[in-house]
Each structure stands twice: as structure tokens, then as C-alpha cells.
Amino acid sequence: MSIDAAAATRDPASSPEPDAETEPVPALTVDALTVRFSGLLALDAVSFTVAPGTIHALIGPNGAGKSTCFNVVSGVYRATAGAVRYAGKDLTRMAPHRIARLGVARTFQNIVLTHGTVADNLMLGRHSLTRAGFTATALRLPRAVREQRRHRERAAEIADFLGLGPAFDKPVGSLAYGDRKRVEMARALCMEPKLLLLDEPVAGMHPTERVAMAETIAKVRDALGISILIVEHDMGLIMRIADSVTVLDFGRLIADGTPERVQRDPAVISAYLGTPAQDAQDTQDEGTQP
Ligand SMILES: Nc1ncnc2c1ncn2[C@@H]1O[C@H](COP(=O)(O)OP(=O)(O)OP(=O)(O)O)[C@@H](O)[C@H]1O
């Protein structure tokens, strides 16, 4: 069964929220988001919207506030002011596990998965969707066994979709770096999110792995119809797969729009890329050849 067919026929027991399958993918609205660390204004009234089913990139030079924004959306940091609205809720007042239950899953910049097999790690992603309690699972009651089997089948399907099928029962530590980054993404997808937050998904990969990962990210959007918010320094990848781009600089939003529009924006060229003429050309080159 294809991953999209599976999504359509999935058991409600494995949905992130009751009736989540029948609900449309919500927009994510970041509204005048402000974060202050002591004297430092890391985000200054930043507003943008991630439209349903799109890849939205958050870019900017080092220290621009991208990770801070990401960490507020996933509930790791608290906002000083402003709101992040998703599915009728303000995420700035919610704990990370409640945000995850709304269907928001994230990956981390640095690989955090080192132990167990790929299957073990993907089953961790299914944990929040598991209904059978600890006792039922420990006693291997038939209901719990059936549920575990269903989750494992779904995890295997997601692994296949991300090209990890042959590695499913292998230890994560034995995989190449690029595949470990894919396991991280597969674990997040195992939560059946409607919004996937990708933190530098190709950092540290070699060029061939980057191109393959870009294709995979676009495939996830197209096959699942979910929204993806991505922080990434690889401009070539962003220009190729993003539907919209928000550019931050020193905590302020300096541009927002399609990749084509943003890469021609003089404020982006001078603030983000440095000297206008040369770097505008570099970006265009990178856009066609990462
Ligand atoms: N927990 C924190 N405490 C204090 N200052 C912080 C904290 N997290 C981030 N900052 C500061 O906030 C600013 C924005 O940092 P942030 O990590 O969000 O930028 P970034 O755009 O993600 O940068 P990079 O591309 O280098 O990861 C920086 O000046 C950073 O030093």
C-alpha cells in the first residue's frame, strides 16, 4: 500500500487527534512573535503564515533568529509577546507534548538517535499514538499485540517511503550519516503530523545526499499533503523546493514571498548575502546547482 493510500485508510486509533484524518491541514500563523533573552531581542514582532500543504522556508544569516522561532513553534522556548496559532490554538501557551498531539512534529539539527534499530526509533515516534497502556503491552494482551503489529507495519511503510526499507532492522549507529538524518525525519513522520518542522535536514550531508533529501522532502509534501516548515542554510535546496520563504535578519523579518521574489529582494541581497552583485549571482547559481 502506498503511503498516501495508507493515510486515507488509516485506523483512527493511529491518528494524532480524534477525527484528525477528516480534518483539513491547518495553517500555521506566526503573529508579531517577539522573543527577548535578557537584553537581546532575538525575534522582533515577526509575522508569517505557513499555508496548508506547502513547504515554507525560514532563512537568514547566523544569529538571525531562525532556531528561536522554531523553538517557540515547537514549545521549547516561551514567547515574550505575540502568538503562534495552529488549529484554533495558541501554541505559545502549550507544552511540547501537547503541541505534538495537535499534529506538529519536529526534527533536530544534530542527530539525536544513536541507539537501537531503525524500527525501534520509528516505534518511539508511534508512542504518542499508542492506546494500549503499559500493563497491557507488558502482558502482551491480544489487543496490545495487534496494536503494536499495526504500528510496526505503518513504521515499516514510512521507512520504505523514505528509502530506509532495507535498513529497517539495522542498528541506527551502523547507518551512513545521510540515512541517520532520514531516520530522524521518518521518526517525526511516524507521529502522523500535519505540520513537520525540519531543522537543517541536510546539514553535514554531501551533495548527492542533499539532492536526494530535497527530493524526499518534496515527495513528503506531495504524497501526504502536509505542511513543512524548514530551517536550512542550503540556499540551492530552498530555492528548488520551497513554495514560500521568510527571511530574518537580526530578529526582524526583512522579506517574505516566493523563492524567486525573495532572492531578488535588495534587502535580502545586502543583509543576508553580503555584496549585492556577486552574491545575487551566487544564489542564482546555487538555485540551479546546489
Ligand atoms: N537560549 C538562549 N539564550 C540567550 N540567547 C540566545 C538563546 N538562544 C538564542 N539566543 C540568541 O538569539 C539570537 C538568535 O539566535 P538563533 O539561534 O535563533 O539564530 P539562528 O538564525 O538560528 O542562527 P544559526 O543559523 O546560527 O543557527 C542569537 O544572538 C543567539 O545568540
Image (tube, grey):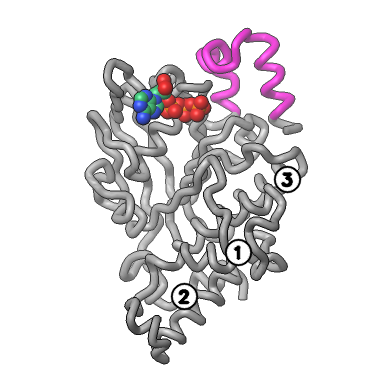
Q: Circle 2 — which element?
A: loop
Percent of width and height locating residue 46:
35, 27
Which secondary structure type mostly characterizes the magenta part of the structure?
helix
- Pointer 2 residue: 10
Q: Circle 3 — which element?
A: helix
* In front: label 3 or label 1: 1
Percent of width and height locating residue 209:
73, 45
Of residue 165 and residue 220, the one placed in the foreground of this image is 165
Q: Circle 1 — which element?
A: helix
> Based on the displayed image, in which of its 4 quarters is residue 248 positioned?
top left
Percent of width and height locating residue 173:
65, 56
In the image: residue 37, left or right of residue 61: left
* In front: label 2 or label 1: 1
- Residue type at mark 3? Glu
Rounded to the nearest angstrom, the CA distance separating label 3 from label 2 is 31 Å
- Residue type at mark 1? Val
Q: Which residues are the magenta region?
A: 260-286
- Pointer 3 residue: 209
